[in-house]
Image (cartoon, rainbow, N blue to C red):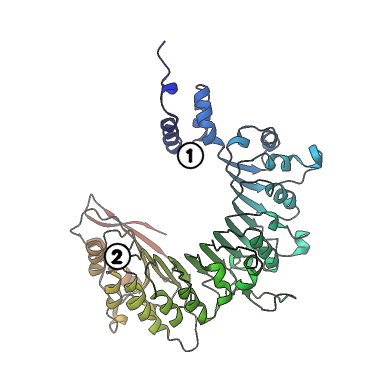
Amino acid sequence: MDPNILDILPEEILDLIVEAISHTWRQEAHTCSELRLVCKTFSSLFERVLFTKTTINASESFTPDQLRSFASKGPNARWTRKLNIQFIDRAEKTEGEGRSLLELAITGLRNLESVRLSVQPHRPNEDVIRALSQLPGLRQAELDFDDSCDSDLTFRGLPRFHHLANLRSLELKNIPPCWVTEIRRTIANSPRLETLDLLFAEFLQGFRGGIEFHPTSDWPEPALDIAWMVKDVLSAPAFTPTLNSLSILGCTPTLSTSAIPYLSALTELVIDPEGTSVIDPSFWVGLSQAGVKLKSLDLSPITAPIVAYLTSYVGLEELDVFCDVDVPDTNPSDMAHEVYHKVVVHHKDTLRVFRADGVSSEVWAFRTEFFESILQCKKLQELKIPFLHGPDTTDISCPTASNLVTAISRELQCFQELSLDFEATEGDLFGFILAVCDIKPSISALQFSIEIVTSQSDIWSLAFDRDVGHFVVISVT
């Protein structure tokens, strides 16, 4: 009898075949399930694909049987790496060791690395977190708090998620602002965090301007003091900074030099663009002295100390300027010129994304002089800017549709997306779009798309059609 090809091929080749099949049929999970029935080898190979990601949702009828499979060391216990807990029901603790079936099932997922938990009132969140804390390989946690979790009274007690220790990534969404002490404890229990993403409740509810924290006995400041948040972890023996990405939305954070020891490995910083951050100018000097070289910065407003910091090193890849906020002794127009003429040009060899979103059109309007700076960024892939067009802009030199598209196609070979916040009349808008569609660039393999957002929030999407040799409108929403 001829040997079975599945017995001859190396395991690495078989894994590549399985990966290719699962990628092709990623929307058809039942196909991989059916392939498990072919033979024992296929069953083993596709088992890891089918059970790598698992969802627990108590509103579905099969969930109790699913949980029993977890607890009895079924396929999930062997292969599940990512767990999504959407809805959990309160269960009596009638199983072994006085624990619920849900707890036993979660602790059975010994290879779990990442979890997403929807935290809802009147649910056994504490039991779930306790079970998750017993998994030695858990490194990533995302907790999404229900909108009604905004008070201890409604929630019937604070879920002690600080029991989740030794995490590398922590993401808290829609978290009530009164729970900052629990965040501090969690950070202290995960001294090697690499990603910290905090989205406070008011941000999701459309609250503009951030939130005001109530002072406590050990925290007198009415703002989210980052130095206070990381105080415990900094006092730990042999602390080594590992945080690469920090995002804080929905509140007014305070950043001072006291926080720099925790942030000295930082490469990405996002601070609430709709709030008013409290940042000591010396913080930026301290970052520079500590050798911190941010690759991505999303912050508003731009001030002279920020410009000085951004021009103290090379390597910035992504810059987001969002929303103009009045700052004493700072001229927004001067800052726009500083960003385009100093920051953008300084990072021309590395900058991939530049967005000026929600800013003053008059201040940040895409003048010809600004465009010349952008064209020096040969690795640029995405550009989002306010764009003025029409007779009211005669005192501002702006590139024409033809100059804009042809220059980008000629000079920026990596470019992918152009987004314009268009300030103009409807007639000028249509004239601009027609002018773009009339352009026939000499380069036939254009890859970038164009999105035009009007003052009425209409979105026009254009893409280059190789068959006709010019841009066409593909959608209007």
Residue extending farthest to the front is 238
377 versus 20 height, above or below: below
Residue for badge 1: 27
Near-viewer residue (242 or 16): 242
* Mark 2 to mark 1 CA distance (whole Å): 37 Å
| Residue at the spot 69% in from the left edge and 39% down from the top edge | 105
Q: Indicate the quadrant containing the N terminus: top left, top right, bottom left or bottom right.
A: top left
Residue 256 rendering spot, x and y as whole percentages: 56, 77
> SS for tag 1?
loop
**What amino acid is labelled 1 in the image?**
Gln
Q: Is residue 168 toward the left or the right of residue 361 in the image? A: right
Specify the quadrant of the image occupied by residue 437: bottom left
Give the side of residue 258 with respect to residue 323, left or right.
Answer: right
Q: Amino acid at mark 2?
A: Ile
Q: Position of residue 269 (x, y in %)?
A: 50, 67
Left/right of residue 306 with respect to residue 89 in the rendered view: left
Query: Marks 2 and 1: which is nearer the front?
Result: 1
Q: Tell me the crowding category of disc 2: few under 14, some 14 to 19, or many 20 or more residues within 10 angstroms, Cα based.
A: some
Q: Give the mark, 2 or 1, whose residue is nearer the N terminus.
A: 1
Judge by depth and name the residue closer to the eye, 294 or 409.
294
Where disc 2 sits, the SS reads helix
Above/below status of 7 relative to 370:
above
What residue is drawn where x is 32% and y is 63%? Answer: 380
| 287 w.r.t. 233: above or below | below
Label at residue 408? none
State the residue lying farthest toward the top.
1
Identify the mark at residue 433; answer none if there is no mark.
2
Residue 82 percent coordinates (x, y)? 58, 45
Using residue 396 as the reference point, say whether residue 53 is left or right of it.
Answer: right
